[in-house]
Amino acid sequence: MKAYFIIFVALLIAFCVKMKNIWLILSLFCVFQTLSSQNKTIIDSLQDELSTAIDTTRIIILNSIANQYIERNPDSAIKYLKISLTNAELINYKNGIARAYGLMGNCYSITGDYDISDNYYNKSIGLYENLGNKSKTAHYQIRKAYLYIVQNNYIDAFLILNKVKEIADKKTEANANYSIAYIYHEIENLEEALKHIQLSLKYYEKTGNIKLIANCNNFLGSIYYHLNKNDVALKYYNNSLELLKDTDLDKDYAFVIGNIGLIKDRKKKYKEAITMYQMAARILIMTADKFPLANIYNNLASTYYSLNNYTKSEEYFQKAKNIYSALNDERSVALCLLGLANLQKESNPEQALTYYLESAELAEKYQYLSFQKEVYHDLADFFETQQDYKNSLDYHKKYLLVKDSILNIEKEKSINNLTISYEVEKKDKQIHFLKSENELRQKTIEGQRQKFVLLIIILIIIIVFAVVLAYLLISKNKVLKRLVKKDKEVIHAEEKLGKNIKKINDLKAVHNEVEKDIAAHILKLMEEDKVFIQNDLSVSMFAAYCNTNPKYISQTINNVFGQQFNSFINEYRIKYACRLLMQEKYKNYTLSAISEEVGFNSISTFISSFKKNTGVTPSYYIKNMNK
């Protein structure tokens, strides 16, 4: 259960990073000291046992010591795990190896080495599957899903979590629902996020697990904070505090205090917020993880700036910048530089300009658009106050360009989020249906076991499988036939109009006149001159036809039609091949002859392109063309 708690903590941290770089604050200093001393006592006790332990007992203790180190000193944990693996492999203790692999995955997950972590989780999952340990398999699958979540790969994470829910017990299902709630939050489907976190909370309340009930309340508060419902958020935060007041879970307790601090900031109660941040800073100074400490310093700097206490603000911006620099986190360094520049712009314009330009350079290096916009805006204002109107105008233009880019990205993100949300909800419904169906089947089989012999059950399963398989094959065939029919309809429609409808629509949407002219020329060469049937057609040849260079051709095809050059040419060749196949003259042609006729040099390339563009193979298309 401790490992699931680590996942929840990590998810909360990831959540906080996205909320204006404000971290959910940690606990009171004395509580932290209590837990640290308890960990030390446990480790000392395990070390005493290790001195006399042998065989599998020694491996179990080594893994346990590593587990105690993971959160605060992952490097030490890794050292113990390497020793554990060496010993476990010598005596072929598979359970010990599987656990060590899983704990290795936890270590590298905390250090941010996600590829290494993923590799160890896969090893652990594979071993536990071979050992038939479903509980541990599900546990590390959830950990693997977490890796995808922190890398914004929500679809793959969701698929893993729902796969876990299919085979998991109630406890593991509740843990999976917690992670799914986080995914929904990240794609801004807060309704589903609330639904899934409440499913987790319902189970935890039944089992009486205080720390997980508290985590759920904290998460609910964070969702309502995101919805700007401060009073509702505060209610859940207070619920969480009440649950944790008699425990020694410093990190949990502190996260809740920190979230209340966010509300203080939002309500402009800056002094109260500062008190929270300073508590957190005292605790984080004692830990090995300096990144959250830098974030706290950054928050303190911003809050002091709001109070016009520029001396303190500069002090904390410098502290944050120094830690970010040591961690090679240049994006966060850029944020601090901008804060320092704004502090210095009146009292020391030369130093301010240095900070501004360094910040802009880092923002451009990492294509951090939202931050570029802010830096360009501030630089434009700075140069205007310095009466350097040329530079002010230049940066104002840059600001407007980035602003437009961000708007387009936000639109695309909104569409992507809707798509992901749709796919996730669809998969969720499918999983629920399959799970219900599976439960019903299990009950049916259980009843049949009392009435029928094993042979009858096997026969029924075979029959059901055969029916489903036949149904799937028939359904697939119908879908493919519909694809063929649809392709024919599109081709007939385009023949009547004499043009490619989709490509014309793509052209109409272009606002850049240069690209529009090149695109129009490209369509003329394709639609009227049919240059695509030349089997040696290249970008350079195409560019020569258009009196331009190859780079503009590739760029225009990509920007206007959303395709690479070869894909664009092959699409026309395949459509032309479909037209030829419908003509009596070409019905006796071989596929090889048809492919050469439309410009392909290779029959294999023709077949793969045909399937990519029509959804079916050429042979299937010909067979069903007239049906």
Image (cartoon, rainbow, N blue to C red):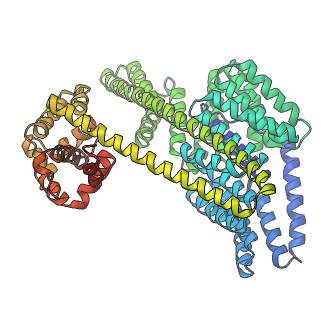
Q: Is residue 248 left or right of residue 272?
A: right
Residue in view at x 64 percent, y 22 percent: 227
The image quarter containing residue 363 is top left
Q: Is residue 501 left or right of residue 386?
A: left
x and y percent of residue 98 in the render? Answer: 71, 67
Residue in view at x 19 percent, y 57 percent: 591
* Residue nearest the observer in this picture, 449 or 224: 449
Query: Vertically, is 53 above or below 615?
Result: below
* Residue nearest the observer in this picture, 42 or 558: 558
Residue in view at x 66 percent, y 30 percent: 312
Number of numbered labels in the structure image: 0
Query: Vertically, is 70 above or below 502?
Result: below
Q: Is residue 381 visible?
A: yes
The image quarter containing residue 266 is top right
Q: List the single residue furthest toward the bottom.
A: 90
* Residue nearest the observer in this picture, 445 or 549: 445
Query: Vertically, is 496 above or below 52?
Result: above
x and y percent of residue 311 in the render? Answer: 63, 29
Query: Vertically, is 280 above or below 74?
Result: above
Q: Is residue 278 left or right of residue 350?
A: right
x and y percent of residue 19 in the render? Answer: 61, 31
Q: Is residue 336 left or right of residue 402?
A: right
Residue in view at x 25 percent, y 61 percent: 604
The image quarter containing residue 190 is top right
Q: Is residue 152 visible?
A: no
x and y percent of residue 63 in the render? Answer: 78, 66
Q: Quadrant for the C terminus, please.
A: top left
